[in-house]
Structure formats: C-alpha cells, structure tokens
Amino acid sequence: MRIVWKNLPLEMHPLARPAALAAMAANEQGKFWAYHDKLFANQGKFARNDLVRYAREVGLDVKRFEQALDSKRYGAAIDADVAEARSIGITGTPAFFVDGHFLSGAKPYEDFAKLIDAELVRPGSPAPAPTPPSGS
Amino acid sequence: MSSGAPASGSLGYVIVAGIVILIVLAAIGWHEARRLRTDLQDRLGQIDSRVTQLQGRLEDIAKAAVPPRRGPDPNRVYSVRTDGAPSVGPATAPIVIAEFSDFQ
C-alpha cells in the first residue's frame, strides 16, 4: 500500500498554509513524514520560529529549509493540489481516495478495509500476493 | 251525553290537525336532516381533496429541501495526481490511498 499526501490548506485555517509550505520544504529533504508527525504533535503552534524548530528537531538542513519556506518554493505545488481538490469537489478535510474511490472525513478503519478489499479482488487489479509484499 | 258529540267531533279535528302538524314537522325535519347530510358530505369531500393537495405540496417541499449532494461522487473513480506528492510505500503497491488534508 502507498499513501500519498495532497495539500488542502483550508481558508478557515490561516496557519494551515505556512504549515503546508514547511512540510513540503521538509519533503524536499526526504523528511516529509517525520515533519508531518511533528506538526500533528504540535497542533496550532505554527509560527515561523516553531516551524524552523521542528525542522531542526527532525534533522533537516535548516538553512535550506528556511530558503524553501521563505521563498514559498512549493506554493505553486500546493495551489495545484488545492485546484485539483476543488475540481474533484472536495469541500473539507480530510478527504481520502482509495484507488480513486472517495471516502469523506475521518472514517473508521472498517470503511477503508471494505474499499481496500474490494480493490484487491477487482478484476484487472494485480492479484494479491500469497505473502504480503514487505513494506506494504 | 248529548254535549259529548260536538266535543268529540272537535277533538277529532284537533287530533287530525295535530297529526298533520306532526307529519309536516317530521317532513321538515327529515328534509333538513337530508340537506345537512349532503352539505356535510360535500364539505368532507372538499376537506379530503384539500388534505390530498396539501400532502402533495408537502411531498414537493420535502423533495426540494433535500440538499444537493456535496462533494465527490462516492460511485465514481477519480484519478488523483500523485507525481511530486509526498508519499510512503512502494511505487508498485496494489493500493494507493490519496489523502487531501491540512495540518491545522
């Protein structure tokens, strides 16, 4: 299984966009998920010095991180995600797509399991390996 | 009992008149009751048709009040762009979950 993060900073969350810019700057250095976890562990504390501190804490090259953050290097990428979300009709976060099938909001595990099982048996999809491939 | 004959004669008239009056009253009463009944039946019919009309209107309103579906169609398969997006898991994974989210 692969999980893909798509940025959808909502306008009603004014700190979501700087956080998304920072997370993408961390992604540039291969540390997106560690930074993602930091942001979720420190909800709402997203002032610039906080964002830089988290970068240091997850072991990023802070100077390079700051350059990416301050120049809004990934602003266009975030805008593209937002535009894509809008064209699909997503109105809130989180919105999940399991192989393109929409699941809205925070859903119980069973909803994911149902969709994933359906995808695994879908004709044309790769047959599930007899032993689960490592890393999925 | 010579004076009884005219008295019984007039009593007979009175009785006949009374019976006639009773018959007339009964006829009036019967007619009135029939008129009332048809009246009531008419009104009931009107009320019935109004209720049916209102029921239809209510159903229309209820239909109109159902908000149009918001958000993506759960019965559609969307292709979400994944190039350049942060991800975890093998590129060849049989299942790809795309999460649109924010950090706040």
Image: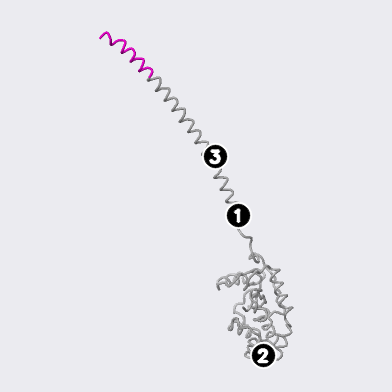
B23 lies left or right of A73: left
Position of residue B74 measured from the top left corner of the image (x, y, whole percent)? 63, 65
Q: Main secondary structure of the magenta part?
A: helix
Q: Which quadrant holds the N terminus of chain B? A: top left
Q: Please identify the residue farthest to the left as the structure is shown.
A: B1
Whether residue B13 is visible here, answered yes or no, is yes
Position of residue A116 measured from the top left corner of the image (x, y, whole percent)? 60, 72
Residue depicted at 69% across the width and 82% down the height: A21
Examine the structure image and report whether residue A99 is included in the region drawn in magenta.
no
Q: Earlier in the sequence, mark 1 or mark 3?
A: 3
Q: CA distance from mark 1 to mark 2?
A: 56 Å
- The amino acid beneath tag 1 is Lys
- Residue placed under numbered mark 1 in the picture: B63
Q: Chain of mark 1?
A: B
- Residue placed under numbered mark 2 in the picture: A60
As drawn, A122 above or below B36: below
Q: Please identify the residue farthest to the top as the structure is shown.
A: B2
Of the pair B18 and A125, the residue shown nearer to us: B18
Q: CA distance from mark 1 to mark 3?
A: 26 Å
Q: Chain of mark 2?
A: A
The magenta segment: B1-17
- Residue placed under numbered mark 3 in the picture: B46
A28 lies left or right of A117: right
Q: Which quadrant holds the C terminus of chain B? A: bottom right
- The amino acid beneath tag 2 is Leu
